Every structure is written in structure tokens, then in C-alpha cells.
Amino acid sequence: MNLDQLIGTLRADPEFMGNVAHWETIPPKQAEYAPFPDGTDPRLIEVLRNRGIYQLYSHQRQAIDLASEGKDICVVTPTASGKTMCYNLPVLGEIMKNPDARALYLFPTKALSADQVAELYELIEAMHVDVKTYTYDGDTPAAARRAVRQAGHIVVTNPDMLHSGILPHHTKWVKLFENLKYIVIDEIHVYRGVFGSNLGNVIRRLLRLCEFYGSHPQFICCSATIANPDKLSESLIGRPVALVDKSGAASGERHVIFYNPPVINEQLSIRRSALQETIALASRMVDNNISTIVFAKSRVSVEVITRHLKERVREPLGNSGKVRGYRGGYLPSLRREIERGLRSGSVRAVVSTNALELGIDIGQLDVCIMCGYPGTIASTWQEAGRAGRRKNTALTILVATSAGLDQYIVSNPSYFFGHSPENALVHPDNLYVLMNHLKCAAYELPFREGDSFSQGVSTAELLDYLAEEHVLQKTGDRYYWTAEEFPAADLSLRSVTSENFLIIDISNSSDVSTIANPKVIGEMDRFTAPMLLHEHAIYLHEGQQYQVEKLDFPEKKAYVRAVDVDYYTDADLNTSIKVIDVLKDQEFASYEMAYGEIVVTWLVTMFKKFKLDTQESLGFGEVNLPELEMPTEACWWALLPSMTSGYSMDDLQGGMLGLANALREILPLYLMCSPHDLCVQYHVRDPFTRKPTLIVFDNYAGGIGLSEKVYGMKNLVFEDVASLISKCPCECGCPSCVGPVSEVGPNGKQVAFELAERLKQL
């Protein structure tokens, strides 16, 4: 059975169609072409024609023309639309004209870097030109690194390696920095929140060194579809960009199905397991030998689905290689083997985490099944784009979970298929982020009086502060690095602070004092560690249970021992919020809204034990850890008496809890962030406003701009909160909207809806 026949079978299947919340058919699109620019190297044209490429897509020609004019550009077109040509052609053309020219390619993952280098190398080999292309990352052999530094025309790396392995050692990269013509940043939509804020500062450091060595590179950025690709690019590189967002690429017919598993508990609106439904749908594809990719959110889910599918295809001799799993933790050689199998067609189904979401070439697949909403519209289209990459018919099935975010998406298809409202936010001037990179920049090159590193924060004041702290030494008009440590080594680009706790496995030792073979198995940020790494906590790592033997707060180390128990632990966290400064505020008919600086205080006081299978409580224990304080930014709504006077205290409590739960589900849609990046709390009587108050704050020290964006949206978000609550079929509350009725009370859902309706009115 081919895919078109299968689609017809699904349409005629009443059991399947009974669970389809929406079926969108996107018609095929004809390509729009443009000729190669005048002056394109004949060798390049000949190689492309040998590959069946006789002309460019219109967006490729537009990007190449803008690059030839010396402009920084951002290309935003769908998956498999040939964005790679938008930067490879200008880069190769420049290097073939000027052999001294250099280019730097930045990809967010090693796998994507390796894939792009392989494609570029094939192109160069076919032209028989001396253009040296190398990958420079943690897997690059030491013997090859000198060759990369001295002779690499195109250096392909990732932000982490640029930050810690290239910029601090720029004196070994003189050839690159003196002749750098192009900087390519692919998949820029990935660089949001803390990661993007850190990358923005890495780019500042990179451009500072380029200026020192006399080069003035252009930027070519590529992104998936988001609401603000040009603004995101400008925030990252600190310069205006020309936007290329009209795709000329052809595409085949695409079917996108929102599949909502059937309800098995009407009162609680609990649905059948999305994992089991995904296995059933994927099995149907495998049974019909239709090439399929399945995306799951966790490593455990990937392994569970893979095991089930392998059993269906296992041959009499035990071979089940037609189905493969793919996730972080697999060795690079195994991942490359799976990718080759997908391209050759010997692998017919692959089950992956979002590791295959980005543009790694995995050949032709027909069907994409997602176990749960990936979290953003951009990521959903990226994953969907892994099927039908060669202009054929493609099918995408999104299997919704019972989570509120999933239920909102499948209940509001117009939100998903309309113009993307998602904004990727970065805040390079976050004081914590900025200060860390200022140290790195000072290590790389002394600052002079009058130098600027940030447009929003006084560089002079920060340099003077570091000099007072004896981190820098001011001599004449220059600031020199004096500390002994290497600043980039302790700074992770994926977190705000470097104060992470190391998790050390001491299973082979009798106690902490006599560690025989200590093994670091992970790390955790300082604000999460008290919750999950307190003494006697059960910590899970790749399916293995560990008990925390000791949490050494001063040394930032947690010692754990492998155990096999039938319970898990959950800590009680007391959170208090103190407003330091109100930066913006405004008053409306029934509520007051404000944005400002706060200090959040956390204290873990006790933990509970719960049985794994039945969830019953097995007792509790005390936790003795110090308080943690985090300065950050927040937005809050204080409800006036005209809005709340008609409710009892119990109903108001349940309604505000439900409203906070629903708001927590909706905000990541707008902010294109992880739900963990934000905290939503409520106070029936807030110590600062003296009124019932909803509070949203950035879950990162110093804030990363999320709550400020929420303040700017005013009441817009509550329209979707009210819609989420009203469209949920449950009677009095469930996990898909305001939370279970046992928490919000019998009237909590109704009160939450009424409050949201009033809050959406200015």
C-alpha cells in the first residue's frame, strides 16, 4: 500500500476519523525560478547542472544578490527549500575569487555540523578546487586542529566551541580573523532565551576580535518560520538585516492531522495514552512498509516505541534493522550509521527525540508522527518537514496528550495554521550574562577606556567594578585580565550562571570519604539542585535510579549511589516574592498591571515519598538547606475589588489557581520558550499590591526579557486563556485546562473563566 492509498483508507476509517480534531490539506506549490547571477564561477554552475540544478529558486537568487551587495541577511523559508545554497554559493564564489578569504559556519549541534560539511565537501570535490573545509568541535582530533587553524577556508563549528575553543585562543587563528568574510548562523530560531542571550555576547566578542585583526565580515542567517526572524537576527548580531522570507521552492501535497486520543474518563477529561496511540499509528505505517519518522519527547518514550516497532518487523532470524531509535546518548558512529540507513532506504522507520528536528539530511520519508506537541509552532513545522522532503505527498500526524498546551493547539487549528505569533526572545544585556562575557572578552583582548561592549549597559561602569574586585587591572587607559582562572571554561552558554552542581556517582565506594572511582554523570543548576538533589532524594538518570547520599552546597557537588527502589521523591518548595522596583505600570477598569524587578526566595523544607505504580504516599522527610535568592524580572496583574467582590474566598482561591494553571500553558505559545523558563504564581492577598494578584516571572537570574514581553502584550494572552478554558469539555476542571477539580474546587473552572473574560478587556 502506498501513502495515497493509506490516506484514503484513513479517511474511510470511522474509528480513526472519530479521533481526528482537524485535517488540513495543504495543496502542492509550483516552484519560482531565477537564473544564476552574472559572474557566477562556471565550475560551480557545471557541478550544479550535473546534479540536476539548472537554475536557482527565487529566494536563493534574492539572498545571493543581497550578499553580493555587502548586506547582512536573514533567510526564512520552509524545511527542504534549499537554504544551504543561500550561503554556500556566496561563500564558495568569494573563496574561488580570493583564496585568502575565510568563512565561519555556526550550527547549534555537532550532528548538523557534520552533515553540512559532508554536503559541502562533495560539492568542492566535484569542482576540483582547493577549498579546505573542516569541522572544528570537541570530536576533532588534536592532530587535525593545527591544520584547521592554519589552512581552513571554511571552519564549521558550534557556538560552544567558538566560545571556549576559538575566541580565547584567537592568536592561533590569525589567518581566520584577518580574512573573515562571511559568518553563517543556521537555525537561528534555536537561539532563544538564555542560549540566544549568550550567543549574542559571543558574537560581540567575535566582532571585537575581527575589528582588532582588521576584518569586517558579513552575516548570513537562516531560520524556521517565527514571528520576528529579522528582529531576532538583529538582536544576535547587533546590526540590521535584510529579510528574505518568500520561498520559491516547490512542495508536494501535505496532509496535517491533529489526532486527539479518545476520552476514557469523562468527568476528569482524561484521554487514552498518547504514547500507546502513537505506537498503534506507527505500527500501521510499518505494517504497510511506509517510510516513517516518529518524534517523542523523552529518551524513555523513544526506547519504548522503538521496542514495540522492532517486534513488528523482526524477521525469523531476529533481524529488526528496518526500525531504529535515534537520540542523544548514542555514539556518533551509531548515529551516522542510522542516517546512512535512512538515506539508502534500508531503514524504513526511525524513532527520535528532537535530535533529528534540525536539517540533517535523512533522505526521503513519507510520514511524520509526533507523540505530543513539540512545544512551538516552529519546531512542529521543522519536524513535519522531515517527511515529504522531495516534493512528494507527505502525511503528518500530531498525537495530542492530555496536557493543556496540546489540547489548546488541537482545539484551535486556526491559531496553528495562521501566521505564526511566536516571538523568539533574547536579552544579551542581562547583567549576569553580560558580566560573564565581559570577563571572557577582557581575557581575549584588553579593554581601552571608551570601548563599548553593550549598547544598553555602561561598559565603563562594569569594567571599573571588575577592577575594584581585582578581576581586572587598570594600567593607563587599559583594563587587563589578572585573575588566574580561564573565564570561558566555567561559563555554559545554555545557562545564566556558572554555579552548576556536579552529580557524582559513588556506587563503587563505601562512603563519600573513600571514593574509589568517582564518575561525573551530570550537572544541575543551583536553583533546581535543592529540589532534586537534597539528601535521600531519588534522582533519575537515563532510567537508572540513584539515591543522593550527600549534597555538598559549598563545593557544589552531589554524591549519588545507584539503587533499585519502587518509589520516587518530590520536595515541597516554599517560594516568596519581594518587589524591589516597579519599572512600568498602568491601570485599567478592573485591574492594575505592572512590570518590575523582584527577588524570589526559595526554601525546600521537606520531601515526600510516592510509590511508583500507585502514587500512594509512603511518608516524608526533612530537608535542611539554606535559602536561595534570585533577582529577576516579573509582570503582574492586581485584581481590583470590582472584579473579585462577588466571590467567596474558597472560590476565588480555586479560580486564581485555575487561571494561573491555564496562563502557564498559554504563555509559552507566545514567547516561544520552554514552560520551565517562566514561573506563574498567584496570591489571594499579595503582600505588595494588597490585592488578589497573578504574577509571571522569568526563571533565570536577572531575567531574560520574557516577563517584559508579557507586559507588552497587555490583555492579549487572556483571550486565549479564556478560549482554552471554555473549549475544554470537562465539567469542573481537568489537567487540560485549569487543573483537576480536587485542586481548584467545584467552582474553580467557572471562576477562572470569568476572571479571564474580565482580564481580556482593557
Image (tube, grey):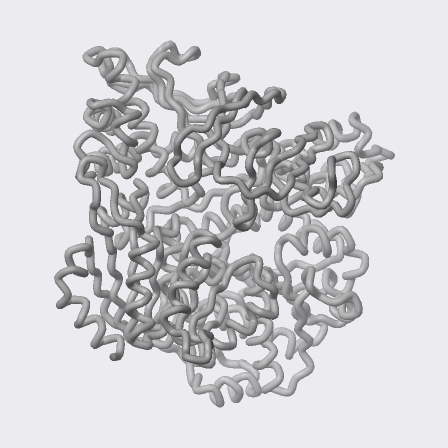
Q: Nearer the viewer, residue 269 or 169?
A: 269
Q: Quadrant of the N terminus?
A: bottom left
Name the one closer to the observer, 279 or 701. Answer: 279
Residue 206 placement, left or right of 644: right
Q: Nearer the viewer, residue 623 or 63?
A: 623
Q: Residue 690 occupies which quadrant of the picture? A: top left
Give the left or right position of residue 398, taking residue 311 as reference: left
Q: Is residue 601 visible?
A: no
Q: Position of residue 762 (x, y in %)?
A: 25, 25
How far across and down, in percent of the image, does residue 740 sit?
A: 28, 31
How many numbered discs, if any?
Answer: 0
Which residue is painted at 79% across and 29% down in the image? 467
Task: Give the residue displayed 80% in from the left and 34% down from the top.
Answer: 472
**Image spot of residue 217 (x, y percent):** 63, 60
Query: Is residue 448 something one can see in this rendering?
Result: yes
**733 is higher (above) or lower (below) than 519:** above
Is 96 situated above or below 204? below
357, above or below 634, in the image: below
